[in-house]
Image (cartoon, rainbow, N blue to C red):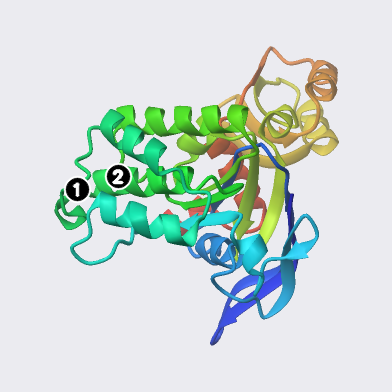
């Protein structure tokens, strides 16, 4: 288990992380999403021991990550831009990773390269962005580390390769203790693969929840209520995150259980009503609007 305790990091006058608390359980796929400049990459670098926090700490099973080679050996960090030695081939990087990670499975890496149709003797500098991403992910998986931190892993991968990487992650979780932590701007990718999601905004975590549980606790409601007083009573009775009215159609995003919302809707005697499931993208927009990150302020 990874625990972040009051982690703070500042670069000159930029507060990248502000007293972040979070917990990542083992054998789940944790998605890290956030607004631009929210601190996702900084958090991953601190959690992997690449950067030192100004205050607070990151622990794995109670042991601090920073300046702890034994714990850092359980973590592999894949940055947004895949890094390789100049003129290196996949074979060269394989031999390097064997030195850094004693548990690296070279035979499996060779097997996966063949399955992904990647030439192990071709210079990686001649590979496309997507092919470099593939090699980086395969290297990370074959380290056999407990935790794989991925910064924009799926960026540059075509749909077939994205699905292949997702399948690899799923099979690793079934076969051993393995926890991928994926930071991404692609909310649809996160939604497809992750069990838990953390939302970062301006250096702080707004929430970190089970994805299914989160979807059960927030709903989109569309209704037509003829009586203005009953409509206002409905708005007052719900924890409304977002609302919009076009003509007679009232659209809301509200936090609460479905049964509670259905009960409040019944009290309002609507001419028409429906409760719709939200995508992760809609939840992201609603939650960030609450703290002032409103798209209307950006485009109007």
Q: Is residue 68 left or right of residue 164?
A: right
Where is residue 14 shown, x and y percent of the image?
A: 55, 80
Residue 203 in view of the camera: no
Count of all numbered marks drawn on residues in the image:
2
Relative to 170, say whether 243 is above or below: below
Q: Residue furthest top?
A: 271
Q: Return the x and y of residue 209 as percentages of the image width and height.
A: 72, 41
Which residue is at a point 54% across and 70% down the rendered structure image? 50
Q: Nearer the viewer, residue 112 or 26?
A: 112
Looking at the rendered image, the quarter that the C terminus falls into is: bottom left
User: Which residue sits at x=22%, y=32%?
Assistant: 117
Query: Disc 2 vs disc 1: Cβ atoms closer than 8 Å?
Result: yes
Q: Residues within 10 Å of mark 1 (few under 14, many from 20)?
A: few
Name the mark nearer the viewer: 2 or 1: 1
When asked about the image quadrant of residue 278, the answer is top right
Q: Which residue is mark 1?
A: 128
Query: In this view, which residue lies farthest toward the bottom?
Result: 12
The picture places residue 140, in percent across and down from the top left corner, at 45, 48
Does residue 72 lie above or below 206 as drawn?
Answer: below
Which residue carries the number 2 mark?
A: 156
Looking at the picture, how far across and down is residue 93, in whole percent? 32, 56
């Amino acid at each position: 288990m990874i625990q972040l305790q009051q982690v703070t990091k500042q670069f000159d006058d930029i507060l990248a992380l502000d007293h972040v608390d979070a917990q990542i359980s083992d054998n789940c796929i944790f998605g890290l999403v956030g607004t631009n400049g929210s601190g996702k990459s900084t958090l991953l670098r601190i959690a992997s021991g690449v950067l030192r926090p100004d205050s607070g700490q990151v622990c794995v099973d109670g042991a601090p990550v920073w300046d702890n080679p034994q714990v850092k050996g359980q973590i592999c960090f894949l940055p947004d831009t895949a890094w390789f030695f100049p003129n290196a081939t996949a074979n060269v990087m394989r031999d390097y990773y064997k030195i850094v990670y004693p548990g690296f499975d070279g035979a499996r890496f060779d097997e996966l390269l063949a399955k992904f149709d990647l030439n192990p003797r071709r210079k990686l500098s001649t590979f496309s962005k997507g092919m470099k991403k593939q090699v980086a992910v395969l290297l990370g998986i074959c380290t056999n580390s407990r935790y794989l931190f991925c910064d924009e892993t799926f960026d540059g991968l075509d749909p077939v390769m994205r699905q292949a990487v997702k399948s690899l992650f799923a099979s690793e979780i079934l076969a051993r203790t393995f926890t991928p932590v994926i930071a991404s701007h692609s909310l649809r990718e996160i939604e497809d693969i992750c069990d838990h999601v953390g939302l970062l905004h301006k250096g702080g975590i707004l929430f970190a929840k089970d994805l299914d549980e989160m979807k059960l606790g927030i709903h989109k409601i569309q209704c037509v209520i003829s009586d203005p007083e009953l409509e206002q009573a409905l708005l007052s009775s719900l924890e409304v995150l977002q609302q919009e009215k076009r003509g007679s159609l009232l659209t809301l995003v509200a936090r609460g259980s479905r049964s509670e919302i259905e009960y409040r809707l019944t009290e309002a005697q609507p001419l028409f009503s429906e409760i719709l499931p939200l995508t992760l993208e809609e939840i992201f927009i609603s939650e960030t609007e609450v703290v002032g990150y409103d798209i209307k302020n950006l485009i109007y």
